[in-house]
Amino acid sequence: MDFMIVRTKGLKKYYRLGNNIVKALDGVDFAVKEREFVSIIGKSGSGKSTLLHMLGALDTPTAGEVYVDGRRLSDMNREQLAVFRRRRVGFIFQNYNLVPDLNVYENVVLPIELDGKRVDKKFVHGILELLKIEEKMEALPGMLSGGQQQRVAIARAVAARPSIILADEPTGNLDSASGHDVMGLLKVAAKQFQQTVILITHDNDIAQMADRIVHIEDGKIVGDGGGAALKKAGDGYAGE
Amino acid sequence: MLANNNRKVIRRMAGRSVRNNLRRNLIMTAAVVLASFMLFCIFTVGVTWIKLYRLQNIRLNGGDYDAVLYGVTEEQREKCESDPAIRQTGTVGIAGYISATENDDTMEAGCVWADEAYWNEIMAPARVSVEGTYPVDENEVMVTGEGLERSGLAGFGVGDSFSAQYVDAAGNTLTKQFTISGIWDGFGEKSAFYVSEAFYRESGFQIADAASGRYYLDFKQTVITPGQQAAYEERLDLGKKQVLFFNSDAEYSLPVFLGLCGLALITCLCAYLLIYNIMYLSVSQNVRYFGLLQTIGMTQRQIRMLIRRQMLLTGGSGIAAGILLGSAVSFQLLPYIIRLMGIRTGTVGEIRITFQPAVFLLSIAVAALTIWAGSRKPIRLAEKVSPLEAVSYRPACGRDGWHRTGRGRLLWRMAVGQITKDKKKSAVIMVSLAAGLSVFLCMTTLADSQGARTIVTNHMDADLVLRNDTLDKEDPAEWKQIMDEEFLKELTDTDGVQEIYPFYTAEIMVPWDPDFMELWMEEFYAKWMNIPYEEAAEEYREHPENFPTSIVGISENEVEYLQETLDESSVPFDKEAFLRGETCVLYRNDLDLTPEDAAGKSVTCVAFRTMDGAEGSQPPDNPASADAGSIYGNMTGGEKSRKFEIAGMTNEGYYYTGTTQGITPTVIVIDTALKEFAADPFVEKTGVRYEADAAVPAENHVMDLIQASPDTSDFSWESKLDSMRDAERAQGNLSLVSTGIALLLAVIGILNYINTVLGNVQNRQMELAVLESVGMTDRQRNFLLILEGFCYGAGSLVLTGTVGLAVTYLIYQSMNYMQAPFMVPAGPVVGMTAVTLAVCIAIPVAAGAGMIRRRSVIERIRGIG
C-alpha cells in the first residue's frame, strides 16, 4: 500500500464576511501519495488556494485535521510549524515572493541557513544549473525576469530537499512559453529529488502535466482523477 | 482650456480617506499632536526657563542690573540717564563700615546707602520680604536677620536700637546708637547695613570715588554683544580708576541666546523628522492607492491637492489637540513650580504661566511649517507613482543590481543589509533619535554643570574656609592666634577632613628701591590714590614703616594652584625655587603692570611688628640698601629681613588679605620661608577640603571643633554647603525645568523612533511573512529585529556621543558664563543609553509580535488587512 504523505480529514475553513459566513473549505477529505504530482483545479474562490495554504501550515483550519508525513499539524506550536515548513515543505508562489535584499544564491539557500545546516554548495549549484539560472547567482531578484524569478523560487523550494512542494499558480504571472518551461523544470526537479508536488493552476495544459487532477468547487472536492476531473470541471477554470 | 471644478470631489475623497483609513491617519495625527505638543511645551517651558535663568542671575547678583560702574561723575550720570538704551540706573555708596556692636567686637560689616531707584527697582526682585521701611533718619539702618546674627544682634527687630562703632571715610572710629527701621530678606549681600542718605552725606564718602561709589545700569535689551559693551565703555569715557563691569550673564547674553536658538533648532529638527518619517511611511504604504488614482485619471496636481487636503485635516486637528495638550501640561505643571519658588515682586513677579499669544502663534506657525516641510518630499513621491504600481507594486522589489553573496551568520547579514539597504531612511531614523538624545545630553549636562555644587566655588574649591576675625582689629594688640598648630592638627584629624590649607600672614614693610618699588608705587598711586605719588614718595623713602603690607605664607599643596593663577609670562615659574623660599609672587592689585615689569627683580621684606604687637626698631637710614639677613625688628628669633626674587604676579583676590592690606605689594611665599622670617606668623585663614560624600558630617565635626575653641566668637567661615543651599534657593527650580525639557525631548526622540520603526516593520510585513513561510521561526525573527534595533540604537548613540557631544560642548561653552567645568553627568547618560537600547530593541520585536498576532502568514504575504 502506498504511503499517504499528505492527508486531510474533514477540513473546514470558514470566514466571516460582514454578516455572512464564507465557507472556503467545507469538509475536505483528501490524500496525496508520496512522490505523486497532483494538480488542483477550480474556479476563482473555489477554495483551492486555501486548501494549499492549510497543507503548508500557512493558515489554520476552522475544523478538521491535516496530516503530513504522519504528523498532525494541529499538534505543533508556531516554532515547530516553522521548522516543519523549512524542512518538509517547499513553497512556490505566483508572485515568487523572493527576499528582495538577498541575491539568487542567498534566496535559494535561505531555508537551509535558517535551519542552521551547512550548505551543500555542489548540490545547490546543481539545482541552479538544472534550472538554468547559475549565471544569475549574484543577481538581486529585481534584476530578473518573471520566469527567472520563478525558477529561483523553484530552486529555493527544492534546495532544502523537502518531501513536498506546494506550488500556488506558479505560472500565473508568466507567458505561455515561460510557463511551460518552468513546469518542465519543476517536474524534472521533483522527479530528480523524489518530491511530492501539489500544484494549483487554472491552465488546462499545465494541469494535464500532473499525474492526478483534483477538482474543487465551493470548498468541496468534486472530482479526483485524470482527465475525468478535468472534463467535469468543464471549460470555466479560472485562477483565484 | 478651462479648469475643471474638481475641488469638490478631491475634498470629498480627502475626507473619506481620512475617515476610512482611521488607523493609519490616527498614527499621522498622533505624530502631529506630538510635534505640536513638543513645540508648544518647549516654547512655553523655554520662555519660563529663560525667565528662571534670569531670575537666578538676579538673585546671584543681588539685583536686576546688567553692569556696574565703579565711581560715577555727574557727566557720566547725565549720559546714562538720557540714554534710551538704559532702562534704569541706581546708585549705591559705601558709607564706611561697622567694626563692632555691643555684642560683637570682632565683626566687620559695610554701611551702604542705596538710592530710591536702586532699592525700589533694581534690588526689589532679589528681595523676598521686607518689614519696616528704608532708613530716612541719620541713625536708622535696614538689615537682614542674617546680618543681625553675624553682628551678635540676633533677635533684634524693627524699632530696636543698638550701639555700634563705625569707621568713616577719614578713618575715624565713631560710636552711634542705631535704630533698626526695617529688616529684609532675599538674595545678595546680606551682611551689609543699609543706611540713610543723611548718614551717607555725613560719612565723607563720594559717589564719584571708584573705591566707594557704585552706579548700576539696567539695559533695555536682553542681549548685549561684546562690541556694544566696549562701545558703552568708550562712550562713558572712563577715568583711570573707574571700571565698568558687565555682569557675567550680560557679558554672555549673546552666546546664551545663540545656545538657546540652537536648542530650539534641534527641537524643530526633531519635529520635522517626526512628521517627515510618518508622512513618508504613509505615502509609501499607499503607493498602490496613488497608482490606482492615476489609472482612473487623477493628475499629479490633483494628487498633490488630495494629500495636502488630508494633511490639512490631520494637521489642523493634530495641531489643535497638541496645543491643547501642551497647554494642559504647561499650565498645570509650571504654576506649581513657580509657586514653589516664592516669587513676589518686581520683574520676576511677572513669571506666570499665562496664555501667551506669541508662544501660541509661534507654536502653530512652527508646527504648520514643519508639517509643510516634512510633507514636501512624500508628496513628490506620491506624485511620481506610476499607474502600473496599482497592479504590481511590491514595496521592496524595486531594488535591482548585483550583490555579492555575504559571509557570516545569516541573521547578522540580513540585519546589516536592512540598515544599509536604504541608507537615507536609516540615517533619518538614527539622526532623529540622536537629535532627541543630544538635546537630553545637552540639557542634563547644562543642568548638572550649572547646578549649585558646581557654580558655588571657594578658593581652590575648598569646602570650607575658616577665618580669624581678630586680625581685622585696628589695634595689633587685639590680634590672636586662634588657629594655632594644635588647632590645625585637630582639624586635620577631624573625621571626613581630607586636606587643609593654612594661610599664614605677617605684617611687613617693603622698603623703597629704585628698581621695582618705585615703579610699583607710581602705578599704585595713579590707579588707586587721590594724591600724586610725588607727594608721598619722600615719606615712603624715609619711613617705609608707614606703608605696611602683608606677607602671606602658603602650604606646599597650594603652590600648584598659585602657579595656575599667575599672569602669563615669558619667564617660566620655577616651583623648586619657590619651595626653597628664594622667590615670591606678588598680588597685582589690578595695577597695569606686566610680569615682564617684575622679571628678574626682587622685593625686600622687613618684619617690624612682633606677635605681641610691639613695634620693632626703626629701619636704617637707608632701607633701600637692605639686604637679606639685615635685622630691623625686635623679633624673637629667625630672620628679620629677606629678599625674594619676583617669580610672578597673581590676580587671585584670596591672597589680597593679611593683617594689613597696604599700598606696597602683598608678598606671597612658601610657609616655611615665612616661618623662618617671622617666627610665629598668624594663621589668618584655613581652607578645608572634605572627603568625597562626607561633606555634611565633616562640616558638623568642624563646627563642633570651633564651638569647643575658647575663641569661638572670633571665627568666621565661608561654607560651600551653605552657599550651595543659597544657590539652590536662588536657582529655584531651574534644574527641574531643564530636566523637564530634556526628558520631553528625549521622549519625543524615542517616540519618533517608535513611530518610524512601527511603520517600518509594518511595511516589511510581507517580507517577514515570506521569511516565515520558508521556515523562519519566531525566535529567529525576533533575533533579526533585535539586531536591527541594536544597530539603530548603537548608531544613534554613536552619533549622540560624537556629533551630539561636540554640539553639547559648543552650546555648553557658549552658555557657560559661570565658568563651570564641562562634565557630562554619568547617571543620566547611563540611564539614557540603557533606555535607548532597550527601546530600540524592544519596539521592533513588539511590532513584529503584534503583526503575527493579527493575521496568518498567508494573509500577510497577500497584504490583506
Image (cartoon, coloured by chain):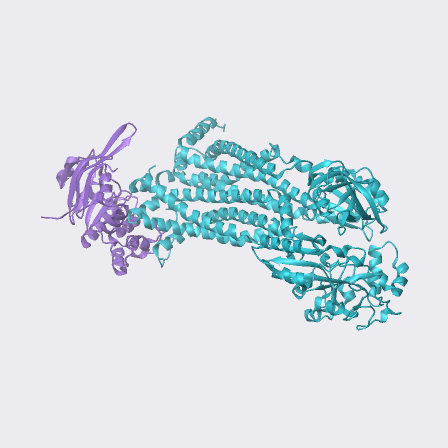
Chain colours: A purple, B cyan
Where is residue B471 drawn, in percent x and y? Answer: 76, 57
The tally of labels here is: 0
Q: Nearer the viewer, residue B147 or B90?
A: B147
Residue A144 visible to the viewer: no
- Percent position (x, y) of residue B350? 65, 35
Residue occupying the point 30% across, 44% down: A95
- Asked if residue B432 can be seen in this view, the reply is yes
Residue B847 in the image, given as x and y percentages of width and height? 38, 43
- Comparing B245 with B127, the one in front is B127
Viewer-nearest residue: B833 or B605: B605
Residue at the far left in the pictured view: A1
Q: Is residue B304 above or below residue B767?
A: above
Please state if B473 lies on the left or on the right of B375 as rendered. Answer: right
> Is B334 positioned to the left or the right of A195 in the image?
right
Could you tell me residue B384's position as x and y percent?
44, 40
Q: Is residue B102 left or right of residue A19?
A: right
The C terminus of chain B: image quadrant: top left
